Every structure is written in C-alpha cells, then in structure tokens.
Amino acid sequence: MNKSDFSRPDPGVLHGFPPFFAGDSYVSPPPAPGWLARCNPSLVFYLQAIGTVCRASWQARHGRYDSRCWSESSLEIVRALESVGCRLEVRGVEHLRGLDGPCLLIGNHMSTLETFVLPSLVMPWLADLTFVVKRSLTEYPVFGHVMRSRDPVVVDRVNPRDDLKAVLEEGAKRLADGRSLVIFPQHTRTVDFDPAQFNSIGIKLAARTGVPVVPLALLTWAWSPGKLHKDYGPILPERTIHFEFGAPLTVSGRGNDEHQQIIDFIGGHLARWRGGD
C-alpha cells in the first residue's frame, strides 16, 4: 500500500464537528463540583455516565450512532468527569492536526477512562477512529452495542499469533478506509508501566501499511479499578488526568528504534507526571 491509499477528506468537510477546545492543548477549568459531587464523586459521575452510555447504546442498536455521535458521547464523559472535580491536561494536539491521513496511535493502557475520552480529543483532527479491543468489550450488555458500531479490530487475547494476524489484516483494512486506529499493546490495563509487557504489534502494522505512528502517553488513574468489577472503580478527582501526543514516527525496517522511542516517551511522561502529582 502506498500513501495515496490512506488519504482522507478534510475532517471539517467529512463530519462537520469542531474540537471542543482551541489551540494545541487543553486544561480543565477550575473545578466547581456541587456538594453531592464533593461528598460522593463516584456516584455523581456514574449516574451521568450511565445515561450517556444508555443513549449511545439505543442509537447504536437503531443504526444512528455515527462518528459525530461518538465524539459527542465522549465529550459528555469529559464533562461528567469535570463536574465531579476531575482535571484534564491534554498536550501535543498539534501533532494530530498536522497529519494528512490516518495514523496509528500507540499508547499505554491504564483504565476505562481513555476508551471513553479519546474520541472527543482526536476525532476532529483524524476524521474517523476505531480501536483494537478485546472481544469481551463487544459483548458487554448495553456498551457492547456502542463498541460494535465502531467496527473495531477484535482480538481474543488467547493466542498471540491469532491476535497478530487479526491486527495486521483487519487493521490494514481500517486504515485503508481512512480510519485511524488506537492500539494499547499491553496485555492488560495497569497503573504501572512495564516495557517488557508492551509488545510491538502496532509497530508491525505500521511497518506493513506505511502509516505514521503517534506515540500516546496517558495517566488516567482518576478512574481507578474496582474491587468487584475492574471497569467500575472509584473516581478520584484529586488525581490529575494527563494525555500527551508525540510527534509522528515513520517506521523503518523492523521498527525496533521506533518501538523504543514510544516506550521512552511513555515512561518519561509517566515519571514526570507522577512526580508532579
């Protein structure tokens, strides 16, 4: 495939929705949660989030959940987080704005938060987006309808060879259709970043297709893992939420250098953010 296979229209023409912030970065306004949100941020947040997901699921079941709807749902989750006192800091958006076609976003995976929030941060610039996800996410009650409507690349996390084949074949199809792809190469979500568990599946896809890779570092520990269900843990507003996009990389050869650059990018940002928080 050559670069022309991955061209796409101007995102403003294609979808017609602007970003929710101006410039190359975003910082949440000073928090002003109400008394109930101060007393029980998790309760207030999840009540709002459940409403958002239920509406999105209804739209998806009826074939009405398009990219604009996904971006708007994602922004509702951002606002719900901010309404209970969470603070977001987003940097490096200029690296998305400068792209002239789809890309691979390769980052660490820490919590449920990034799956919900990323669409509103990147879709105005990348026109369309989907994820590489484990199959269970497409089978969840209610949310599964939303995830399936986004036509993700599905992996089983059982046989690495089968997962690699799925990502290389199905991922290339999404990219050829002009859709950017988010890949979290870790085996599981974790607050602690372990480079040894950060595989090169995304780099292999980039090498095969020739699309640029955008490193993504994130710290989303404000949405902590739950004891009964990992996806639904306490919301901790005192923990700042960070996203930073790096300069696009062009993968050459086996991509070992680019893989290491992504690891260094993520590790360096996590160390700095944790030192600051």
Image (cartoon, rainbow, N blue to C red):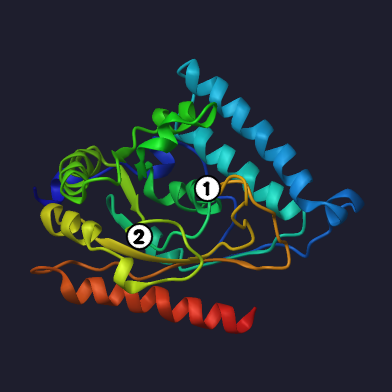
Q: Residue 2: give x, y in percent of width and height.
A: 9, 50
Q: Check residue 120 in the rendering and tell me which mark sits there, or answer none.
A: 1
Residue 227 located left or right of residue 82: left
Which corner quadrant of the image does residue 222 belong to? bottom right
**Pair 2/1: label in front:** 2
Mark 1 or mark 2, which is nearer the start of the sequence? 1
Total label count? 2
Q: Secondary structure at mark 1?
A: helix
**Residue sitting at 22 percent across and 63 percent down?**
200
Q: Nearer the viewer, residue 63 or 270?
A: 270
Tag 2: amino acid:
Gln
Q: Residues within 10 Å of mark 2 (few under 14, many from 20)?
A: many
Q: Check residue 186 in the rendering and tell me which mark sits there, or answer none.
A: 2
User: On screen, 1 above or below 272?
Assistant: above
Q: Residue 260: give x, y in percent of width and height.
A: 26, 76
Tag 1: amino acid:
Ser
Residue 34 located left or right of residue 249: right
Q: Nearer the viewer, residue 22 or 261?
A: 261
**Residue sitting at 49 percent across and 65 percent down?**
218
As drawn, the residue found furthest toward the front would be: 228
Q: Residue 159: give x, y in percent of width and height.
A: 21, 46
Residue 125 located left or right of residue 166: right
In the picture, the quarter occupied by the C terminus is bottom right
